[in-house]
Image (spheres, helix red, strand yellow):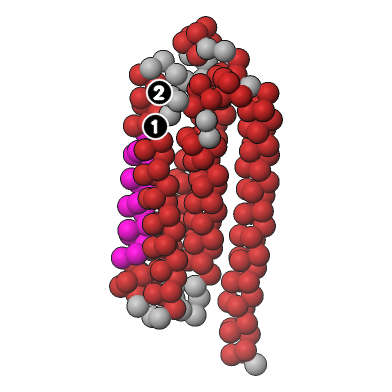
Amino acid sequence: MEHVTQHSDPHFDQEASKLGMWLFIFTELLLFGGLFIVYSIYRFLNPESFQLASHELNPVIGAINTIILLVSSMTIAMSTSALQKKNKGLTVLLLEITIMLALIFLINKYFEWGVKFEHGIWPGSSHLVNDMSKGEILFFGLYFVMTGLHALHIIVGMIIIIVALRRVQKGTVNPDRPSLLENAGLYWHLVDLIWIFLFPLFYLIH
């Protein structure tokens, strides 16, 4: 009887953590869904200004970051498969690659924002307030809020993946208890999905 209790408790915890992660993902989708609706309304009301402002963004950098996130989603999915196949070394390697790709994404975003700052474009800047139309101000306001919020999610995702990586190395995340790694993968796919919407909205639709 004691053996059954020890076996069932971890199973229950894993199921509860998965449910918790799905609920969290749902709330995140509501948050970004609301922002996408706000963006769509303002774009409809200010089509010319949004089109003009979008030319300030570099679609090549956006495309590179999209590829980086798509590859990182693949590597974290592969790490879960590697764990199921009891290949600990490959799991660790794939997670390290995922973290490296996330860092590269953030570095690219840092330089992209840096270029905007050099051009005097940041929330509340005199150039933005005095020299641009209301629609352009709205565009860049949404750009900084939404891409900044996404970057914050990237950082949170990296922390979760690092924790999962350490526990894989220690053996506390293993083929019998994979929930932390699976949850990290779910969260990371959410981050990827959000960017797939952000990229065309800001960089491609003119």
- Position of 95 with respect to 176 (left or right) is left
Residue 11 lies in what quarter of the image?
bottom right
Q: Position of residue 73 (x, y in %)?
A: 44, 58
How far is the residue under mark 2 from the one under mark 1? 11 Å
Is 106 covered by the magenta stretch?
yes
Residue at image mark 1: 58
x%, y% of residue 147? 50, 36
- The residue sitting at 52% across, 30% down in the picture is 206
Question: Which residue, given by chain and number where applicable, does mark 2 sit on?
Answer: 116
Q: How far from the left and from the top, in percent, is residue 70?
A: 43, 55
Q: Alpha-carbon neighbours of circle 1 within 10 Å: few (<14), some, or many (≥20)?
A: few
* Tags 2 and 1 touching, CB below 8 Å: no
Report the span colored magenta.
93-110
Give me the disc on residue 27.
Answer: none
* Amino acid tagged 2: Lys
The answer, for residue 180, to whether it is visible in the render is no
